[in-house]
Every structure is written in C-alpha cells, then in structure tokens.
Amino acid sequence: MKRTLAHFKMHKTAMLAAIALPALLAVGAASAKTLVYCSEGSPENFSPSINTTGTSFDVTEQIYDNLVNFERGGTKVIPGLAEKWSISKDGTEYIFNLRKGVKWQSNKNFTPTRDFNADDALFMFERQWKENDPYFKVTSSNHSYFGDMGMPSLLKSVDKIDEYTIKVTLNAPEAPFLANLAMQFAGVQSKEYAIAMLKAGTPEKIDQDPLGTGPFQLVQYQKDAIIRFKAFPQYWAGKAKIDDLIFAITPDASVRWAKLQKGECHVLPYPNPADLDAMRKDSNVTVLEQPGLNIGYLAYNTTKKPFDDVRVRKALNMAMDKKAIVSAVYLSTGVAATNPIPPTQWSYNKAIKDDAYNPAEAKKLLAAAGYPDGFTTDLWAMPVQRPYNPNAKRIAELMQADLAKIGVKAEIKSFEWGEYRKRMQNGEHQMGMMGWTGDNGDPDNFLNTLLGCASAKSNGSNVAKFCYKPFDDLVLKAKQVTNPAERTKLYEKAQVVFKEQAPWFTIAHAVQIAPVRKEVVDFKLSPFSKHTFYGVDIKK
C-alpha cells in the first residue's frame, strides 16, 4: 500500500508520543500508580454500539458498564448496572432491577445532575433499535452487532417500570440473550448527556468525548499516538487500584516488544510469534497464554461470480496449503482450523474432516465449474495484527502463490483498518481475510453473527454474504432452544452444512498470548481477548 502524506503525519505523531511517554512515566511514577498498555491501533470512535473491533472495545471496556457483565477472566454472567434480574418461565420476559447511587463521569462538555437510572438503560436499547430515535444515525446508523444478532426482530418491547426497574419482552425465547447483553455493544451511555448534546447541536460528542459509569474516564486522546485515562474515584464497585492508565498506540509488534523490554509499557497485545522465545527468557516478563476463542478465515463473497458457485469455493479451499501457511506464519501460536468455531467452544463438531490440500483435484473442480484456465480475483489482507491473525499480508502472499498454481491470479489489496472493515461489510471484495474472537462464550456468537442471513443482509459481520436457508434454519432454531444437548446437536449439523457450502477458507485458531511486566499484578487473560484493567495493580 502506498505511503501517503497522512501516513507520514501519523508516523511523526507516533514518534513524538514515543519520545514523550518515558518522561510522562517518570513524572507519574513519583505520585501515582501508572500502567501503560501498548495498544496496537486507534479506536474507530468511543461509541460502544457501533464498533465491532477489539481495538475499539479495549477502549470502551474501560469507560462504560453494562446491565450485566462477564466475570473477569471468565464467561459467567454476573451483575453489572443491574444488581439482579428475573426471567419468566417461557423465557420471553426479563425484569432488571437496577443499582441505585451509580455515578456518571463528567467532562468538559457536561456535568451530570443525576445518577444512572432506567432512562439510560432504555437509551442503550433504543439508540440501536428505533430508527426514529434522534441518536440512531449519529456517528453511524450501522449498529451491526445489534443487527447481526437479530435484536431488531427479537425485541418486542423495552419498558420503564420505575426509575430503577426495566422490563424487556422478547418475541421468542433467546438462549444467549443475557450473555449478549454483557457484550460491548450493550455498554450504557448517559441519556441526560445525549439530550444536552442534541440541544447544543453537537450530538456526535457523546461518541467523541465519552463519559460513562465505568472504572476509568477519558482524559486525552491523540489519534495514532496516545489515550490517557484516570481512575474514576466514584466508580460504584470501588476505585481502580491503578491511578492512571495509558494506551501507547504502537502498531508495530517489534516496537511494542522493545518498549516492554525497556519498561516503557507493561502489557503487550498480539506479540510477533518470532519474538516469543526471547520473551520467555526475559526475567522481567511473564508470558500469559491460553487457548483462544477465535477463528481467522478467508471469506469468499458468495454473491459475486465466480464465488457464487460452491465448486469454485471448494476448489480454492483445496488449492491452498493450510498447514504450510499456519506453520510459516503462526509458528507455535496457532492450530489449523477446520470448523467456523474453535475446538474450545462447546458444540464443536469433531467428526468433520477438513478439505484436503489437493491442487490437482482443485483444477478439475475449477474446470467443471467453467474455469479450466482459472480466473482473476482480488485478495484482501488486513492491515493490522489481530488476535486470530499475526500477519495477514504474509498469509495473503502464501495464498497468492498457491492459487497461481491452479491458474487463479489474485491481486492483494488492503486499506486502513476502519476503511477495510467498512468495505468488507459493504461486500466490495471478492475474497477477503477477516476473523473473530468470541464475545460471550456461545456458539450463536460465531455461527449466527458471522454466517446468518440477517447479518448478511444488513452490512453486518457476515462478510461472505452467505445466506443459505438450511444453515440459517438450524442456527435460528438453536437460539430458541434452552436444552444444551439439543442446541449442541443443531450446531453440529450446522457445521456440517457450513463445510459442504464452503463460504470460507478456515485458516487458524490462534493461542491467546500476552507478555506482561513482572511488576503487573493480577492481570487476567479474557477468553474474549478483551484487555480489562479494573482489578489490576502495579508494584511501585
């Protein structure tokens, strides 16, 4: 990708931030506990309802709270802004009893006059659900998570019973509903702040200058350089153990590692696999690792020729040497993927066999589909490291070389990360790399969110634009079943259909790895690859 003037400005900004950061730490160390996280990129914005990338979620995770949360480092749903809840026998009615005395943060635009209440909880739903809500189109009208999971058709009503009680009524039972509400898209924003900014003619400020009820509040944001937070002293669960939290935005994995070695940052996401041996030998570093709840894949745009033909998709799956790709790029940090869900996810179908690497058979299939001499296509590669893909550009080059052997000429393309994701969701690609880290520990979060018809039609996360009724019927039925054994059978069948239809070339499941400095206390890996700093301490 060509280096533009904007690129050099970004590089200059990042360099200045890198120079300033050690001095900032030296000043802060004398008076407060400061933790520096070497983030891999900039957030798209500070709206929890619009973003779908882990980079943005890492930021909103610090600022906002949900009605329900996941326990730190686990998948169990625990109370959040709702201190308790009840569910009707038929599974369609939820009563949430909200906490009293929960304080809002303030910023230069706004000072709250009241505590969190039911109006804020309703605003979280209605901003994403009601097209006539004045905030539905603010920043973006593409509330893709909300839409991908079928929330618009699932919700029948959301009602305020009193100041601290809301009732959510569903059109049908939804097994993962509570877990879904613990996901980032359901972070609660202030309705009072929203109304004030609307009256001021600057509604977008609630997503640019955020305030929440979470453990940290935003102090400064310099795009592609730094994000500074301070602990919110009135946080309802108790003030954070660290006083200042800094995101030092550092896209290059090698530079992140150098900063960790020097003590310029304390936690490092997405390390370069080639650096792991050195990290494990460094006496100042602890390398945390656990199996990742993720999938990296190449999506075929099933609405565009020639990928509307399953024979073409199958042919390409057989033409690419998956084992060689995983060995060369992931090294010891990934396992070749067969299914669209990871082996650690319940309902994983162990009986399914992967497409064999067989270029000769691939050529026969292409000929049968009407492409004896191959064809020309694009191959989109992500510009950033993700939990499921350490080096998309290198993988694209290996794929390109394999496909050339069967006559398929693939042109590698890429864009800035936010633009890349937007264009993929719009379906502008023919083939494109993407991936997913589970958000709630439920198979629905993969199979329906990434491959369901609702997500394909709404510019959502189904970037293969795969809408196949036999598959969709299975995953939609599984959502409404509460018996885990019955749900498992439905999801196992859905994985068989997926493999037959081949909307993706499944690449790998990556091991989740986080090198941290020894002075960091109680940082926990999340199964959802979130980086949560509430509860973390640092030795001074």
Image (cartoon, helix red, strand yellow):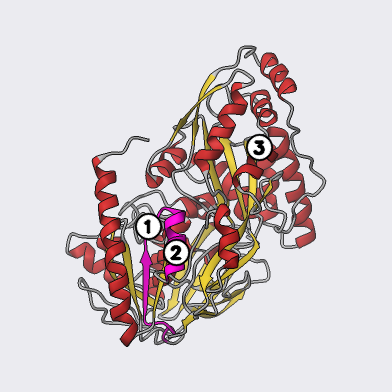
Task: Specify which label sits upstream in the sequence, 3 or 2.
Answer: 2
Between the C-alphas of marks 1 and 2, the distance is 8 Å
Element at label 3: helix
**Residue 478 placed where, x, y %?**
70, 53
Between the C-alphas of marks 3 and 2, the distance is 35 Å
**Residue 79 placed where, x, y %?**
55, 78
Tag 1 residue: 43
Q: Residue at x 36, y 56 (%)?
A: 42
- Quarter of the figure with the C terminus: bottom left
**Residue 504 placed where, x, y %?**
62, 37
Task: Specify which label sits upstream in the sequence, 3 or 1.
Answer: 1
Q: Nearer the viewer, residue 391 or 120?
A: 391
Q: Which residues are magenta?
A: 239-262
| Residue 105 covered by magenta stretch | no
- Quarter of the figure with the N terminus: top left
Of the two numbered discs 3 and 1 in the rendering, the one whose residue sits closer to the viewer: 1
Element at label 2: helix
Q: Indicate the quadrant where residue 290 lies.
A: bottom right
Q: Is residue 220 left or right of residue 453?
A: left
Q: Which mark is residue 109?
A: none
Q: Indicate the quadrant where residue 189 lies.
A: bottom left
Tag 2 residue: 58
Q: Residue at x 50, y 39 (%)?
A: 393
Q: Nearer the viewer, residue 42 or 215?
A: 42
527 over 341 or under it: above or below: below
| Residue 247 covered by magenta stretch | yes
Element at label 1: loop
86 over 174 or under it: above or below: below
